[in-house]
Image (cartoon, coloured by chain):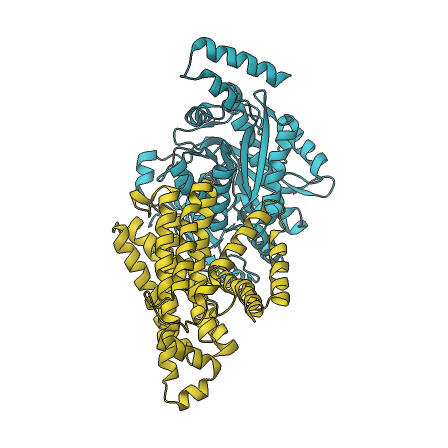
Amino acid sequence: MTTIATQPALQSRTFAGMTGRAVAVAAIVIAVAAALPLVLSNYQVGLATEILIFGVLAMSIDILAGFAGRTSLGHGAIFGVSTYVVVYATAQAGLSPATSFALGIAAATLVAVVFGLLAVRTSGVYFLLLTLALGMIVWGICLRWTQVTGGENGMRGDVRPEWLVSHRAFYWAVLAAASLVSYAMWRFVRSPFGLTLLGIRDSESRMRSLGYNVSVHLFVGFAVSGFFAGVAGALYAMFNNFVSPSTVALAQSVEGVLMMIAGGVGTLFGGFVGAAAIIALENVVSSYTERWQMVLGITFILIMIFTPEGIIGTLRAMLKRKER
Amino acid sequence: MHRRQFLKTSTAAIAAAGVGTSPWRSALAQSGPIKIGLLAPLTGVVASGGKEMVEGVQFYLDQVKSEIAGRKVELVIEDDASNPDTALQKARRLVEQGNCHMLIGNLLANTGLAVANYVKGTGTPYFIPIIAADDLTQRQRIKNVIRVAGYSASAFTHPLGDWALKQGYKKIATVSQDYTFGHEQCGGLAQVFTEGGGEIVQQFWHPLNTADFSPYLGQLADLKVDAIFAMETGADATRLIQQYSSFGLKAKTPLLAAMNGTDQSVIRTLGEECEGIIAPAHFAEGSDNPVTQKFVKEYEAKYGKIPSLYGFSMYSGVMWVAEALEKMGGKAEDREALIDTVLKTELTGSPLGKTVKLDSYGNPIYDVQIRKVVKRPDGKYWNVPVTSYPNVSQFWTYDPETYMKQPPYSRSFQGIKKA
């Protein structure tokens, strides 16, 4: 459904940079999503919340992967840093949820800035490896700095403010936040800046010879992407009221990337579809067999073979063929 | 028939007593099975332990034909993947979707702590026969999280420290996995041993899943200590014991281990290199107690292996809950009553062959066995008690209040008394 909203806007702008059709689609999608808790059980509402949070993470990775041609394996760490900071700030330092939330996002952005400074000079597999290594450093710190992070056991605390304790209230809050940041990301990738990133993806040398400062663009892109991953991480802290090194581990980064790929690289909103597909699959399959990881693995291979553009990418291609 | 009869009588009883505004409804709610949600790591780093946890539970339920207090028991098993985030998600699923009356299980402390934090909000009774994190029954107690048939990490190494002193050991070095479970077990030993005049010469902390122990063993060999204490679980334990022996240290320095170091899950695959290792625990599969022997024999007959602590603990844990449920007529819906009854219940059927009860902090009081690994006539190795410390409290001989004022054991605090 969301595909249409991502179509290049050739039509005249009408509302907040969106075409009439895009506004309508966005409104319908949000309305349907907002109505979900009325029909779902509490547990399913919890799952839906998780899907939204991981959808935002996948989208933040897509900013780099789909629009700047740089796949990051360090975003799980950036995401997790925000989670750690939020849990620490509320549970240990006793700060208010709002302050903690802001601090978490700031910390994640800061980490992304550092990552970006080191990583933007590279591309391709080197970028992948560098971000992977940086993420592992964060994981190592969280694991070993026991006094602050609680080591292997992690940290617990009541992060969620009183008025968000119910499943539904929290879901709606996350939905509002996710809609807001999705819109922001969508605007970002369609801005002149975002188009420059696209240009860099397609041909770095050409952009350079046109006078664009490639490194600075990539650096800013990385920081912005880290900011959004931080938003997701802060929401995750409130969702779980708990954080441990597994939240910053490589597996988290990989899961984010897989969600993005399953949804469709460069489709942005595919992040939600990918997150939904993977989280739903994990939950359904794992209740039937303990070999659920194998089933997931096979599913990924099948996705790669049959729909390399991801779920949204394939749907979009089908729509296009129809229109012709 | 049994259940129907039970229903009839209980409905009549409730109606007669006029309990509640709608007696027929509470009777209806009770007509279904007792739903127990079991969380175990069936995948991930501790998957082999997780499978034995499931076996332990099923072994008990098979014995009682899946019926407790006249009600059918429905066991819902979920894989926590050795990961706290997954554990949390699965706990939500069991409680919110599966409508389980209680949760039991988890192996790794981080998964258990994550679930404990979640059930703190929901009030669901959560039983942890394996999770050993000290603070769950000490400084950060949660009322509905109960360590039935479990143990707190430092509870068994306190007496080991005392035992080491009695052997005349003056100097001990420790080598341990670098995480809370290791910190706590080493801390228990270090505190009692140094307060009794012993010296902890050096402590080595290595990351989980260390393939090569030679850097540590080389240094340990140079220390000239009277004994070495190793706190290892799983594959690390296997590797350490093998390399300890092949380094020639086995012949020179006695090896003391944490209970998990010589657990069946580890020594099952080992040969003579594990012989003679000393480890403290409540359960010794090689005990000559007839009740223990019966349990071990039956378990071995069914699963083809000597039961490990995982199987034993889960078996006893479910039995504990079952005994409590029998007492309260199987009303698993009444969470408050279930928690209170479990806390008050004394486990009579324990394979330990002795009644076990909980202290006022919800931690079981055991006779701690100092065990030695010996060879059985059939060539398998098992733990045989050497001596026993009766009724050991998780606070050892300290006053609970004073004890809990000291910080929890960590890498930086090991309770070591400065000479």
Using the rendered view, name the quadrant where residue A165 is placed. Answer: top left
Question: Relative to residue B160, is residue A146 drawn left or right?
Answer: left
Chain A color in figure: yellow
- Residue A285 vs residue B59, the one in the foreground: A285
Q: Is residue B413 visible?
A: no
The residue located at (56%, 25%) in the rendering is: B32
- Residue B363 vs residue A109, the one in the foreground: A109
Q: Position of residue A194 (x, y in %)?
A: 39, 75
Give the chain coloured cyan. B
Using the rendered view, name the quadrant where residue A198 is placed. Answer: bottom left
Q: Position of residue B112 (x, y in %)?
A: 47, 43
Q: Is residue B305 visible?
A: yes
Q: Is residue B73 above or below residue A323?
A: above
Q: Position of residue B272 (x, y in %)?
A: 67, 50
- Residue B356 vs residue A33, the one in the foreground: A33
Q: Position of residue B165 (x, y in %)?
A: 45, 42
Task: Give the quadrant of the C terminus of chain A.
Answer: bottom right
Q: Is residue A44 above or below residue B201?
A: above
- Residue B355 vs residue B16, the one in the foreground: B16
The residue located at (62%, 33%) in the rendering is: B287
The residue located at (46%, 70%) in the rendering is: A72
In the image as oriented, which residue stretches furthest toward the bottom? A209
Q: Is residue A298 above or below residue B190?
A: below
